[in-house]
Amino acid sequence: MPASLLRELNSLLGSSNVLHKNEDLVLYEYDGSVEKARPDLVVFPHTTEDVSRIVKLAAKYNVPVVGRGSGTGLSGGALARGGGILIVFARMNRILELDLENARAVVQPGVVNLDITRAVEHAGLYFAPDPSSQKSCTIGGNVAENAGGPHTLAYGVTVNHVTALELVLPDGEIVRVGSKHGDTPGYDLCGLFVGSEGTLALVTEITVKLTRKAEAVKTLLAIFDAVDDASNTVAEITARGITPAACEMVDGWTLCAIEDYIHAGFPRDSAAILLIEVEGLREAVEAQAAAVEDVCRTHHAREVRIAKDDCERDLLWKGRKNAFGALGRLAPSSYVLDGVIPRSKLPQALQQISQIGKKYGFSIGNIFHAGDGNLHPIVLYDPRDPRQFENAIAASHEILSYCVELGGALTGEHGVGMEKNELMPLLFSDADFDLMRRVHDACNPDSSLNPGKIFPLSKGCGEIRVRKQAETLPAHV
Amino acid sequence: MTATANLATRLEGILGAHRVVAAEAELREYAIDGMVPGAIVHPASAQEAAEIVRFAITEKLAIVATGSRSKLDLGMPPARYDIALDMTGLHEIAHFDPGDLTLSVDAGMPLRHLANVLSEKGQFLPLAVPCYETSTVAGALASGIDSTLRKQYGTARDFLIGAEFVDGQGAPCKSGGRVVKNVTGYDLHKLLVGSLGTLAVITRLNFRTFTLPQARGGHLACFSNLEGASSYCDAIEKCGLPLANLETLSPEMVALTAAALRETNAEFAGHLDPAKWCVCASFEGSEAVVPRIARDLQKLASETAAADSEILDAASDAHLGSVSREAFDWLRWASPSAALFRIVLPQSKPGDLAALLCVAQESSLRSALLVRAAAIIYFVLLAETEDESALHTLENAAAGVFFLAGAGQGHATLLHAPLKLKSRVNVWGPKRADLGMMQRVKHSFDPQSIFAPGRFVGGI
Ligand SMILES: Cc1cc2nc3c(=O)[nH]c(=O)nc-3n(C[C@H](O)[C@H](O)[C@H](O)COP(=O)(O)OP(=O)(O)OC[C@H]3O[C@@H](n4cnc5c(N)ncnc54)[C@H](O)[C@@H]3O)c2cc1C
């Protein structure tokens, strides 16, 4: 990295907003995935203009830039695969406007997801997308990944709640797309940029919709002695057209790990539980809860408990949302997958995952958004053993290929990043890549922004900018 | 040989004579704002559509994909129009998994037929758009026209989960998939919504479907002025009642609606008082929920001093709903020269609506106004003649409407206007800040601008 670039960044942002020492940079070579890549410099902009100037400087020095929120991403999206400057949005964390009357909030990208809800809940409103990482992940990261969460089953994912964006393009140009109310005439540019994994533009301001809290809510915990019964329950809830606000599944093995850690009141001796929430008008909630309970009993639920108060409900959700952390205590490393399948195929998918685990000698936990068919098999492995790491990757590829075979997709919410880009040809043809590449190049022609992501390295977009040594090294070796 | 005959012959050489039409009378049926294509092609598969696109690229010809042709007058007149690619020959359901509530359907499938198939499994697609009885699924999506169910189910972008299409290089492409949650690759299919055929030829669309509600109901409240109607709507929003639709009608719109209703249900038309502002609510849900919402609305109406209010049974609600769904269609022809705007403002306050009505008054034009889903304003200016003075008046009034929309940080588009007005007023309104980005998108999909050139925002 040229010393003059560091000097120029220091004078632009002040040295407290620039990191360049190795011991500081190592903190930024990870995200939540198993990947690893070290940036050459880390900077903390405070304004959109800062971002634009940083990007222009990077262009002048022909150095790649990568945006980063909290680094909780699970596909290596926020890693500087080609080195260069990592732009961390943590200090652009102001809520710029709350328009409660029109249910809109305008925020900077570094605002933490849950902080939006905290700022508006006094008015009976909240921000609906609720990734399990919502206490730490940022809205910028949510926008880039089109993040989901347990309650996206009823309320939709991030893209359904974003109406406008301010963007900085790789040449420093500042562009606004969408509008406060939404419904802008012309192409749905918000729909394109949300979920583009930080490969088209950096997001510097986001207008989100706020949702009104439901009048009534009921949380049910259904306990099963067989995984098949739980998955058949989910398939039938879907088929009967009952739309719970959330429908999460946790297998027995994972439940024990959670109980050791959180003490949420989950049974230790069951094969699986479903955590199902119904929301809406009181009358609707009563009827839906009864219908859900009926389906659970039909599929041999051993017990269906209903949380009796907010306290019990919060505890159940705490157990669910901290599950990854709980599993982290069981093995040196865990690998969270994110395949999606048609919900009617849930029972056979879970059977196959268990088979694949057996084949490679892993215990695979399952804790996932069952209602959307969004699987999160978790492979526990020891990265100090290179064979285990290789096997974990192989098992993951086999599981994701199976999801595709069932008519599903490679990722439901975590993104492709640098983790699944080589699997993309399972779904997309050369013509599909060609069009995606043209759209990419229309915004990011030199692949100077977040190179080496989404596209298989052989299919263009940034291969020249990817450092050889940074490729798929396990994070913990 | 004329140019048209020559084109038709070459197209016949590609797909056979039975797929190509060049008879004058039929060509006229495919006219867009008076422009007639050189030939009509009826592909029977995505591959055939791609072959025609590739031919058009080599020959530098312009293509407009068409469905039932009910909304071809949306947008600006095309700059060039050589081939009408009639997609109604692609009309199969490629995949329907009722257990997963997902659907994959060919572009030319009529919405009505699709609804019949889905309803056999107790499901539906919430695309309640005008010209419903004839519209095709891809036409409805590409037109970007509002569904009256958007308040509850969102717009097509919220339930479109994937698409297959032919891009401007003649390549069959896809994006998204057939699962309800998916972030694999760029969401290019979202760009097709409302794109008026300017990006690609849609060949197949994947949706999530929804279960038909157990019960439906409606409610009608009438107010002596706009303020009353507005405070009632505010009260509804505040208590968060889940409604499928909520429409506020100005007295003139009430009269037009009553006239449209009279054609199918004369008796119910009598319930609409053309001297009042009317607020119509539709709602759905379980047998227990529907009466509960009706009761709450009745209470809110009396608290906000409604002059009149009544609970509608499912049949009356359905009648009223189908008439209001078609509003776009009948408003277009409500006077010899009608200019129909769609306006979105961050806040649809009574003052904004009054200001719009004022524009009409100042121009001595009849006007009517409808606020849909508490968010989208349909505003029609009705000139009684087609002469120069009427055009001039409409032109000035349109400038006033665009100005008001811009001043309120919103935007307006002209959904329908007399053709002569289109040569004076850009229906998309003033130039937008994100036009450059849209041009980049257009260029990546359609580098040679062969798809419906000139119809879209900013001359795209
Ligand atoms: C315990 C745990 C639970 C999780 N649960 C969920 C879940 O339920 N649902 C879910 O969807 N995800 C979940 N995730 C994944 C992750 O939290 C989300 O992807 C989240 O959106 C990432 O936000 P972040 O701020 O950490 O982004 P980062 O990881 O820092 O970045 C993610 C991507 O966003 C890009 N980016 C960040 N900011 C910007 C910006 N301003 N402009 C442009 N690009 C930007 C980065 O370049 C990168 O590609 C979970 C992760 C963990 C560790």
Image (tube, rainbow, N blue to C red):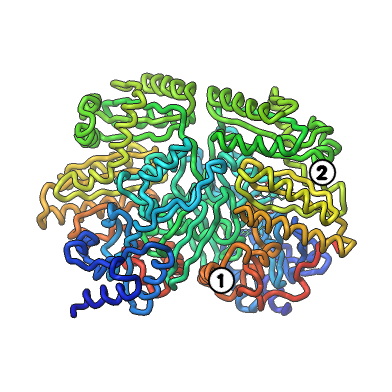
Mark 2, residue position:
A326
Helix, strand or loop under label 2: helix
Q: Position of residue A363 (x, y in %)?
A: 83, 49
Q: Chain of mark 2?
A: A
Mark 1, residue position:
A430
Q: Position of residue B250 (x, y in %)?
A: 26, 35
Name the quarter where the C terminus of chain A is drawn: bottom right
* In front of the other: B456 or A428: A428
Identify which residue is drawn at 64% across, 79% down: A61
- Left or right of B72? Residue A340 is right
Tell me: residue B276, above or below residue B161. above
Question: Crowding at label 2, few (<14), some or many (≥20) Cα neighbours within 10 Å?
Answer: many
Same chain assignment for discs 2 and 1: yes
* In front of the other: B183 or A391: A391
Name the amino acid type tagged 2.
Ala
Q: Is residue B133 visible?
A: yes
Q: Is residue B407 visible?
A: no
Q: In terms of image quadrants, where is residue B263?
A: top left
* In front of the other: B69 or A146: B69
Q: Report, in whole angstroms, how far the alpha carbon at label 2 lies from the one at label 1.
A: 41 Å
- Left or right of B299? Residue A212 is right
Q: Position of residue A336 (x, y in %)?
A: 75, 52
Identify which residue is drawn at 17% across, 66% down: B24
